[in-house]
Image (spheres, rainbow, N blue to C red):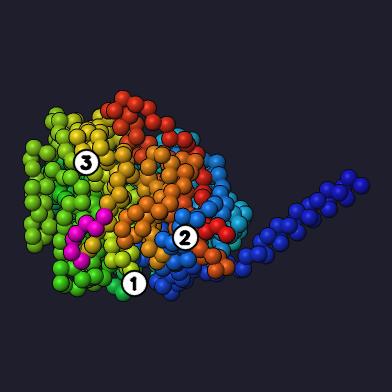
Amino acid sequence: MKKTIVALGVIAALAATATATAALPAYSPVTDARLKNPEPGNWLMYRGNYSGWGYSPLKQINTGNVGKLTLAWAYSSGMTEGHQAPPMVNNGYMFVTTPNNQVIAFEAKTGKELWRYKKTIPDELQQLHPTNRGVALYGDKVFLATTDANLVALDAATGKELWVTKVADWKSGYYMTLAPLAAKGKIMVGSSGGEYGVRGFIAAFDAETGKEAWRTHTVAGPDEPGGDTWPRDDSYKRGGGSVWITGTYDADTNLAFWGVGNAGPWTPDSRPGDNLYANSTIALDVDTGKLKGYHQYHWNDGWDWDEVSAPLLIDIEHKGRKVKSLVHAGRNGYVWMLERSADKVGYVDAWPFVNQDVFKSLDPRTGRPTYNEGKVPGIGKTTRFCPSLWGGKDWPPEAYNPQTGLFYIPANNNLCSELTGEKASYKAGDLYIGVALDNILTNVRMTPESRKHVGEVQAWDLKTGRKVWTHTYPEMNWGPLLTTGGNLVFGGGTNDRMFHAFDATTGKLLWEYPTNSGVTGVPSTFEIDGEQYVAVQSGWGVDAQRMQGAFDAVLDHKTVVPQGGVLWVFKVGK
């Protein structure tokens, strides 16, 4: 009798699972055509489209009813540290990554867990940035770039591991945190690890087999174009140039655009020269990996101003001229407008969006900055500069709304840093930065203005280069932005745990919701059965927590931001 009851229980459980799964249609393969023209109801990639806009045309949630947003469902990830990935949605299936190489699949409407995958991290691997910024969806697979520098392909419907490809050796300091970029049968990833003296790269792999198609280094070697911008030794092999944010893609020219981090070690006098292609946007042919163009935002960097955010592709009229532009809000504190073509990246315009005291001027033809030499760090030299080493904008992505014509930036203004350089000694797997670690973690330098406010959400008119509105926060803003056809801008990023919604035209705060932790996740929005949802992960950690520690040290207070990751999904209440 007992066996019969158990058997009936198993059958009932299986039947319940089948019923729940049956509520979802069969998984729809993600094709190149769908990625090129994504349906408004889905969120198929890191920023919603190849152009990197962070925009959805959905408008059911709008300025008139956003105040009625209520919780549809929530889910605790079971992880601490930085939850930064966007919830990606394909016809009812949602995929989210968390720290520690975890992927969770949900029924997007109800929050029912469909499957969970977790790749073990080697015990001896020290996670410098314990986070993950999302998956790539392509065909019937889900692709994960892991902390131990592997690329994993999973079956989207079941979570079954299909293949694992080693991308780089984690024992040498390589790791990965970005969401891969999928296009034309290839899955592209970039390497983190510049703090360990690695040589950065972008690599592409066959989506079906995992076989490597090409690999392009972001630090030029001696016999490569740009190799003469490095010393005539082997320093290029340890030159940094990390790529840890997803690229954007122009399907018309088949070019992918990637942001490249700073050169290593940090002290610029240890590596004289421009140090190409560090702190640059580079354009790569997706078929071959060949470099087709670049723009270096600042040369011989000494401020840790990684320019890793990929530029947004925006066709716009700027000061009376039509431009197929690449727009980037730089960690160096300037908005950059570049121009893209099939074989070149050109300079158009740039202007500061936060207080900046390092650049004396920009060359009007090339955009190359001239420096205030008193603001350039060096070995045995203590230097104060603005913006801080976290930049005018760190990794959290900007957003562009084609209806308002405005470009939105999650900024940190009025904040400075102070660094003392030291000679770096290289040992594989050890930090190789040329600055004392305690100097980095306590380097916030306040100004009279920053004691009033630091964090901002800014809106810029790209046609004129004019700032339209600014919303300010007391301390910091680490909040990626989402904008929608409902004339809204969503973002978190503050230590008060709030997730906010603004009027995209005026900047008026329309709604906010207290989450469990600080919101550093990339928001997304989607539609199920005619109803729009907004989703975001909350989970404070990594650099936001480190900046908070620096604030606390300088201001002599202790700010506690609760830890732990939760996925929040909202809709308009009935």
Residue 327: x, y in percent? 25, 61
Q: Residue at x 83, y 48 (%)?
A: 6
Residue 303: x, y in percent? 20, 41
Give the alpha-carbon distance from disc 3 to disc 2, as whole Å: 34 Å
Query: Which amino acid, by three-letter code, is at mark 1?
Result: Ala
**Upstream in the sequence, badge 1 or badge 3?**
1
- Tag 3 and tag 2, C-beta contact below 8 Å: no
Q: Residue at x 8, y 51 (%)?
A: 361
Viewer-nearest residue: 220 or 460: 460
Q: Which residues are magenta?
A: 463-469
Query: Which amino acid, by three-letter code, is at mark 3?
Result: Asn
From the image, state whether disc 2 or disc 1 is nearer to you.
Answer: 2
Residue 480: x, y in percent? 37, 51
Visible residue check, residue 293: no
Give the alpha-carbon distance from disc 2 to disc 1, as whole Å: 36 Å
Which residue carries the number 3 mark?
A: 414
The local secondary structure at tag 3 comes to loop
Viewer-nearest residue: 375 or 184: 375
Which residue carries the number 1 mark?
A: 251
Quarter of the rendering containing residue 180 = bottom left
The relative height of residue 175 versus residue 434 in the rendered view (above or below) is below
Neighbourhood count class around disc 1 (C-alpha, 10 Å): few under 14, some 14–19, many 20 upward: some
The local secondary structure at tag 1 comes to loop
Which residue carries the number 2 mark?
A: 65
Residue 306 belongs to the span the image colors magenta: no
The relative height of residue 42 versus residue 544 in the rendered view (above or below) is below
**Upstream in the sequence, badge 2 or badge 1?**
2
Give the alpha-carbon distance from disc 1 to disc 3, as whole Å: 39 Å
Q: Residue at x 25, y 35 (%)?
A: 451
Q: Which mark is residue 239?
A: none
